[in-house]
Amino acid sequence: MQIKERIVPQGIILDVVGDLTYAHRAVFKAAVEKARQAGCRNLIVNLEQVRFVDSAGLGLLVLVSQNLKLQQAQISMLKPQSYVREIMSLANIPKMIPIYEREEDALMARAA
Amino acid sequence: MSSHAMSHIGQVPDSSPGIETPAATILLIEDEPVTRTSMAARLTRLGYRVLEAENGRAGLELARRERPDLLIVDWMMPEMDGLTFCDAIRRDPQLKSSQILLMTAHDTPAQIAEGLVRGADDFLSKSASKQEIIARVLAGLRTSRLVRKLETTGEELKSSMLLLEKKQAETEADLQTAAAFVQSLLPSPGSPVHGITLAWEYQPSLTLGGDLFDVMTIDEDHLGLYILDASGHGVAAALRSASLMTFLRAENMLQLLGSYNPEQVLFEANRRFPLSADGEYFTLWVGLLHLPTGSLSYASAGHPGALLSSAEHPSRWLTHASFPLGFDPSARFTRDRVSLKPADRLFLLSDGIYEVPSPSGELWGRDRFQEAIDAGKQTSLSATIASCFAAARGWQQAQHFPDDAAVVGIELTDYREDTFNG
């Protein structure tokens, strides 16, 4: 898994490529921690290039969501593929972490 | 000829102030007495401990006994010449890494090449200046120190590796014991109550698995069943799972809740097993089967669900979207109900059975799993489960699963059929 960070005026976008799984949790944690230390208030995880998220990956997303909320910040997800969306739906993740289809919408959500 | 050896000890050269270094030992093998005595005296004055031998055979005995740091050997000698001596040293397991300085008047390229091939490390001309002798001896000793350090490090490394392998074997034995204990907690295949057949297959991704399940008698009319899936792998996940399994025991739930009501079980488990600091959690599916009527009530906490397979209808999933345990401390879980008929089969499963990638990365998926279950309706329960595992393994073209994989099946046979039909 690879993560590219894009800093935009309304937040930070993490473009994730590969599987978000137990084996890659350290890479994801490090990227989130870097964004958090940079004072990010709006973290957008772009899942367009992610084919699979396992239970450990879901746990990390929820943990990040809970931790960011404590700091009045938020996380959202962008363009998950259909199978990833199905996994997330089963675990009710969309009720906890907003999902957007367009980057502008994710950025606007925070601005609003 | 008998071994003739003499020893001289002088000052240690280049010793650092305050650090006592033992004098390096040099074995000088030379048949010509004047040359040998003169060279020995020179080396002794330089601070080395010098051993002397008058031919290769005597030198070899001395080398085996004293393990000198440097061997200075004449090329031409009676009994055993320098080249034969080099051969013998390189064949000796204890001495083969010794540094050999071959003294010679032979210095053509062909002779030097032969000396190197036979095992010499460097050459010293008999007409060499005092400075050259010192320089070559120092170089030889420097190499000798490095080689010995390397040998010591290698031995330490080998010793550490052996220790590590021993520890690893102990850890593996501990894990096997723990795995056997966890396996003993799982229900025995067969018939947990009259009229119900139970079969299952479970393959943890590591020695210890984080997916656990149970099928248990709650009272004379009820059968409780669940499957839990811990996020993550390995010992930590297995320990957390064993802890939740203990919590889910029938007697514990009856004492705590007065029943095995699935949504209440999930509510309590959700309160007691929060998301860990590392983002670890459980998904859990709980069912309660009323044996007289075949009525199954069930609830799910983020679990992919159970699959109900009946003889007349296509199989269907028994689940709905819900938070896994620990995501929301105040979460409520919905109970659903379905009627099971004789010959119906209910499969509890972990996502590890269908989240297996093909070599190209495509997942086998829930739909293919469901097709495999439907295709096995005419075979026995255990054969159907075995065929699912075989299909998943065939898809991924590997025996071992990347995640814990479990499929638990129960089938209603003829138990209280009159009641079901009534």
Image: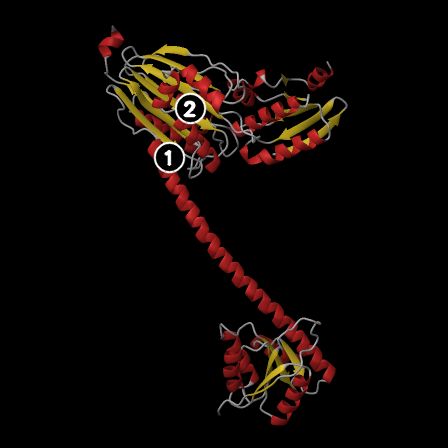
Looking at the image, residue B29 lies above or below residue A20: below
What residue type is disc 2 on?
Answer: Phe
- For the point 65% across and 72% down, the residue is B142
Q: Which residue is mark 2?
A: B369
Front residue of B413 and B395: B413
Front residue of B411 and B46: B46
Image quarter (top left, top right, bottom left or bottom right) of the C terminus of chain A: top right
Mark 2 lies on a secondary structure that is helix
Name the image quarter holding residue A32.
Answer: top right
Q: How is the image coloured?
A: secondary structure
Image quarter (top left, top right, bottom left or bottom right) of the N terminus of chain A: top right
- For the point 50% across and 89% down, the residue is B3
- Mark 2, Cα crowd under 10 Å, few <14 / some 14-19 / many 20+, is some
Front residue of B107 and A44: A44
Chain to which the residue tagged by mark 2 belongs:
B
Front residue of B251 and B405: B251
CB under 8 Å between discs 2 and 1: no
What residue type is disc 1 on?
Answer: Val
Q: CA gap, disc 2 to disc 1? A: 26 Å
Name the image quarter holding residue A111.
Answer: top right
